[in-house]
């Protein structure tokens, strides 16, 4: 009950008209940042940092400052979904999985429904994560410490196995696409030996292939090229704008409570570990597809396919703040800037923060509740506005989207080479889609490939080449077993059915 | 007109050819990856895999899957169309200017190049009038300039125009 | 065009200095006329990144620069991405870079073509210490206990975690091994914060984290410092935990293995910039160093606050490059052809 008391105190600190206004400003900025692939949360936090110093002069100002900064973070989490759904361009890496069903929904004229589902899912995920932080933070911080290289590898393996499974595409096309992703992920400097891999003397390849550039090209540009085939029309143009769309979608959502709950758990787990919001969204989408009644229809525009990744991404993004506060390890660039902000106010993240800076921490936690509520209200009222963007004629919106893609690719490393790469990925995306090569395995392999390889080789170093380390304790063994079970799930369920069938006959 | 339409519906490339080209590229990439992995060392030594261990097998699998995909495509008894001429034309109508746009970015900076690109797209494909075109293309570039350079302080590529205006 | 902009900026600089003359005669002649990029050749959250963001915050808080200073992380290829960018930006006074030891180690270990000679040295900010850490729940009370235990366990049993491969952490590890006759399993991680957390979680046995990367865990009673890799003890005597100050940590020399290593935290500019431009940043950095926030930051991280500039700084860097070459040659970390 201590927590509730502290939380009420926290609300006392966070709940003022001034702070509510700051939340509104922060969320709106964050949404803009989330929408544009060229801007990351780090940019927004960085420009507002100076402003917060003048605030910090007033009493309670440090809390106001951190409320403003963290609301940018929530806004960016909400905003990433918008362009994914409307144009198939993920504004942030964690919204890639949202495109799989969100964009088909928009094409069917259901953009409003998809957006509402995405935002509501995000909110549910965040709420779940904040509740977890409020009541279980000491336990959770301890749990995060259990993750060494072997455990990380098993988590990545689990993500792969949850996502990959039987799909409609030819199996060797799936394999080729995934291996291409792994090969691209390996380009650059190898963490374990410090050797340069597959750069062939080129200095542009030193930094490797960035996930965002590949995704902008494969999904964004590839999609526009394919749309062009059918002439100058966006399919989503017929989108009807109903004011009641939000309420209508809400009536439908409780039906998928199981998917939401699972996504919340997956998201929080990945956020705390910290595996990150992007793998969380993929894992959650994969699991939803495997266990949903409508699993076969995933990818054609089902609402569960939108809520699952969004809920998990937001839960992960929110719960990732806990390891940042208690361990001092930021899970994302935005979190790193927040961390820098904490330090200049004399707050040292670490095991003692919760005892030494009680007011601040509980103020921050209270602002997580309030910020997300404000955020949900802001984005939901804007759903009709966002959906109406699709009414802009294709020959105006298409070049603007392409310009946004180019800017987004450039800003990742401020390099022209990346813009050319994006173009190349665009052509690859178009050709692959037409020939039935799936893009998702490539993207997943690209985002997780080097991390999985690093943690695998770190664990091999630690065990001196003994694979037994992957089963060396209950946690890692359990995760690995779960991963393998998921991978062979179709096979297992087939055998299971047969056994049951035989029994049924006898 | 009729013959023109017919012409547009003829196949520019068949699926078979496209599949084989993609498979060949995949195999070539696989070989490239394998060659570099050999340089790095592709064995499993006493303390685990070397830097080239995983990439080497990734290369091998790329080659195998490329070969299987090519064989499957060659043995496909149906002749299917990858793109018709009409579709191909439309796609190139976007793709070629896009390549030009990226080349222009390097020369003129992202803002000037974007203005030109949006304007050409609108006039050429959208058949909009000058006034509307100018308003949209200049407006969008100006908005991006304010957003990135002024507001968020993210410097993008700039060209001679910005230098002349002292905005660089 | 370049000429035009140069003359434009000259004119504006002249105007500014005229205006400044009437107000305060000490204002430097050159000032940035657009946003200055502050490049960090490492990922987010590490020591260099923390310092850069600290400087950014201090500059913003005390309004030390008229234009804004923006931190950009370019850590690809063990920092090569950032260094190559600055190398390629010859004559651009709107870029500065903060260095860590990868200024020396990355070109030597990977063969990527850059050297500190491509850059203009501005100022040394501080020297970062290294400390041998173990988990506080382990029985080792001092460095000798730990080394003895590692020896008794035999080669390749104890795990030393560090940042990156063939970089400062591994160089120190190899030096310790050479002097004590131990053999650790060196496990490279992506960043210093990650290493500290792995040590708290007991996935590794020890680390050579910088003070700033591990201080929070030390204060929280999770980690224990064994010895400092320096020739003399730290000068910070204020208590960090209830019973220990930085100055209470013995040097490794006192513990029987004479390994000392300090890491450069300094600022460089691209090559081909004018002396006036360098002077501007030198002045800003001097003001940064005088703020209370910076002093507290230095103390929190137990930094050695030696600050050199000009020729002294360049000489120091040249000497340090030679030292890294020798150290890495001995550890067989050099790229083929180096």
Image (cartoon, coloured by chain):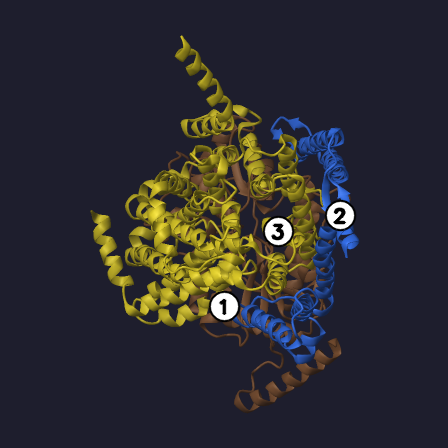
Q: Colour of chain C?
A: brown
- Mark 1 vs mark 2: give the one in front: 2
Residue C58 visible in rendering: yes
Q: Quadrant of the C terminus of chain A?
A: top left
Q: Mark 3 and mark 2 in contact? Answer it, CB < 8 Å.
A: no
Left or right of B149 on screen, residue C336 = right
Q: Which mark is residue A201?
A: 2
- Mark 3 vs mark 2: give the one in front: 3
Residue C320 visible in rendering: no
Q: Give residue A147's position: percent from left, percent from top.
A: 44, 37
Left or right of A481 on screen, residue C242 = left
Q: Alpha-carbon neighbours of circle 2 within 10 Å: few (<14), some, or many (≥20)?
A: few
Q: Alpha-carbon neighbours of circle 3 within 10 Å: few (<14), some, or many (≥20)?
A: many
* C177 vs A76: above or below: above
The residue singled out by tag 1 in the image is C289
Q: Give residue C67's position: percent from left, percent from top.
A: 55, 74
Q: Chain of mark 2?
A: A
Mark closer to the chain start, 3 or 2: 2
Q: Nearer the viewer, residue B136 or A425?
A: B136
Q: Disc 3 versus disc 1: distance between alpha carbons?
A: 52 Å
Q: Disc 1 versus disc 2: distance between alpha carbons?
A: 40 Å
Q: Chain of mark 3?
A: A
Judging from the image, what secondary structure is the residue with disc 1 in?
A: helix
Check chain identity for marks 3 and 1: say if they share one: no
The residue singled out by tag 3 in the image is A223
Left or right of A57 on screen, residue A233 = right
Q: Nearer the viewer, residue B121 or A166?
A: B121
Q: Which chain is blue?
A: B
> Which quarter of the picture shows residue A335?
bottom left
Q: Chain of mark 1?
A: C
């Amino acid at each position: 009950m201590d927590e509730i008391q502290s939380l009420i105190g926290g609300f006392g600190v966070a709940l003022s008209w001034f702070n509510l206004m700051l939340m509104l400003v922060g969320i709106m900025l964050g949404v803009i940042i989330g929408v544009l692939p060229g801007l990351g949360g780090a940019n927004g936090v960085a420009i507002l940092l100076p402003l917060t110093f003048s605030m910090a002069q007033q009493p309670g100002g440090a809390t106001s400052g951190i409320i403003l900064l963290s609301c940018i973070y929530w806004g960016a989490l909400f905003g990433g979904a918008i362009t994914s759904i409307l144009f198939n361009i993920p504004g942030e890496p964690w919204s890639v999985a949202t495109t799989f069903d969100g964009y088909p929904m928009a094409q069917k004229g259901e953009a409003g429904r998809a957006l509402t589902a995405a935002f509501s899912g995000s909110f549910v995920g965040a709420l779940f994560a904040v509740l977890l932080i409020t009541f279980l933070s000491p336990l959770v911080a301890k749990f995060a410490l259990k993750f060494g290289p072997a455990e990380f590898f098993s988590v990545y393996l689990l993500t792969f196995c949850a996502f990959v499974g039987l799909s409609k595409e030819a199996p060797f096309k799936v394999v080729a696409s995934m291996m291409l992703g792994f090969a691209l992920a390996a380009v650059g400097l190898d963490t374990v030996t410090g050797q340069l891999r597959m750069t062939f003397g080129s200095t542009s390849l030193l930094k490797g292939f960035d996930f965002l550039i590949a995704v902008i090209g494969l999904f964004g540009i590839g999609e526009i090229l394919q749309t062009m085939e059918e002439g100058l029309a966006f399919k989503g143009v017929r989108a009807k704008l109903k004011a009641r769309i939000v309420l209508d979608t809400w009536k439908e959502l409780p039906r998928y409570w199981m998917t939401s709950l699972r996504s919340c758990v997956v998201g929080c787990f990945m956020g705390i570990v910290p595996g990150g919001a992007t793998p969380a969204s993929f894992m959650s989408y994969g699991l939803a597809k495997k266990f949903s009644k409508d699993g076969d229809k995933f990818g054609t525009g089902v609402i569960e396919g939108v809520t699952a990744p969004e809920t998990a991404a937001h839960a992960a993004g929110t719960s990732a703040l806990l390891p940042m506060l208690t361990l001092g390890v930021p899970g994302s660039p935005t979190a790193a800037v927040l961390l820098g902000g904490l330090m200049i106010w004399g707050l040292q993240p670490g095991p003692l923060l919760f005892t030494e800076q009680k007011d601040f921490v509980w103020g921050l936690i209270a602002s997580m509740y309030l910020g997300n509520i404000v955020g949900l209200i802001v984005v939901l009222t804007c759903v009709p506005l966002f959906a109406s963007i699709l009414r802009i004629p294709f020959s105006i919106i298409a070049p603007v989207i392409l310009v946004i893609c180019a800017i987004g690719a450039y800003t990742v490393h401020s390099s022209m080479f990346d813009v050319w790469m994006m173009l190349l990925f665009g052509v690859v995306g178009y050709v692959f889609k037409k020939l039935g090569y799936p893009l998702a395995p490539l993207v997943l392999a690209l985002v997780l490939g080097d991390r999985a390889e690093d943690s695998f080789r770190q664990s091999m170093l630690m065990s001196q080449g003994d694979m037994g380390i992957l089963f060396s304790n209950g946690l890692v063994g359990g995760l690995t077993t779960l991963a393998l079970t998921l991978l062979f799930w179709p096979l297992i369920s087939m055998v299971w059915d047969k056994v049951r069938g035989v029994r049924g006959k006898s | 007109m009729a013959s023109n339409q017919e012409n547009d519906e003829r196949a520019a490339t068949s699926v078979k050819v496209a599949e084989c080209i993609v498979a060949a590229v995949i195999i070539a990439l696989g070989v490239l990856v394998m060659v570099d992995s050999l340089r790095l060392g592709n064995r499993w030594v006493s303390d685990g895999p070397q830097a080239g261990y995983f990439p080497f097998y990734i290369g091998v699998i790329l080659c195998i899957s490329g070969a299987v995909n090519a064989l499957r495509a060659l043995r496909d008894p149906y002749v299917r169309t990858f793109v018709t001429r009409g579709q191909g034309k439309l796609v190139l109508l976007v793709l070629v200017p896009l390549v030009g746009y990226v080349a222009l970015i390097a020369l003129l900076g992202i803002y000037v190049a974007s203005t030109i690109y949006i304007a050409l797209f609108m006039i050429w494909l959208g058949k909009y009038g000058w006034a509307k075109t100018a308003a949209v293309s200049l407006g969008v570039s100006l908005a991006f300039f304010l957003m990135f350079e002024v507001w968020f302080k993210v410097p993008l590529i700039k060209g001679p125009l910005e230098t002349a205006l002292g905005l660089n | 065009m370049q000429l035009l902009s140069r003359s434009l900026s000259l004119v504006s600089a002249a105007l500014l200095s005229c205006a400044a003359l009437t107000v305060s005669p000490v204002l430097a002649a050159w000032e940035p006329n657009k946003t200055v990029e502050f490049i960090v050749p490492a990922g987010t959250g590490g020591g260099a990144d923390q310092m850069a963001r600290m400087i950014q915050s201090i500059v913003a808080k005390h309004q030390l620069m008229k234009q804004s200073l923006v931190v950009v992380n370019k850590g690809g290829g063990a920092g090569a991405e950032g260094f190559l960018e600055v190398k390629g930006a010859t004559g651009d006074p709107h870029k500065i870079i903060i260095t860590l030891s990868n200024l020396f180690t990355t070109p030597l270990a990977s063969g990527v073509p850059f050297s500190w000679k491509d850059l203009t040295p501005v100022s040394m900010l501080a020297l970062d210490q290294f400390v041998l850490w173990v988990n506080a729940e382990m029985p080792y009370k001092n460095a000798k206990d730990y080394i003895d235990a590692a020896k008794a366990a035999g080669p390749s049993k104890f795990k030393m975690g560090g940042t990156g491969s063939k970089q400062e952490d591994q160089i120190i590890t190899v030096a310790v091994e050479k002097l004590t006759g131990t053999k650790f399993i060196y496990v490279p991680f992506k960043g210093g914060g990650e290493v500290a957390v792995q040590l708290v979680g007991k996935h590794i046995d020890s680390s050579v984290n910088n003070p700033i990367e591990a201080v929070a865990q030390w204060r929280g009673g999770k980690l224990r410092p064994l010895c400092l890799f320096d020739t003399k003890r730290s000068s910070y005597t204020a208590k960090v935990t209830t019973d220990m100050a930085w100055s209470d940590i013995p040097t490794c020399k006192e513990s029987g293995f004479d390994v000392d290593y300090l890491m450069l935290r300094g600022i460089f500019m691209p090559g081909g910039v004018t002396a006036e431009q360098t002077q501007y940043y030198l002045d800003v950095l001097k003001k940064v160093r005088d703020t209370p926030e910076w002093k507290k930051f230095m103390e929190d991280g137990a930094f050695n606050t030696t600050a050199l500039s000009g020729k002294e700084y360049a000489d120091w860097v040249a000497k340090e490059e030679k030292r890294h070459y020798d150290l890495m040659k001995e550890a067989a970390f050099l790229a083929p052809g180096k």
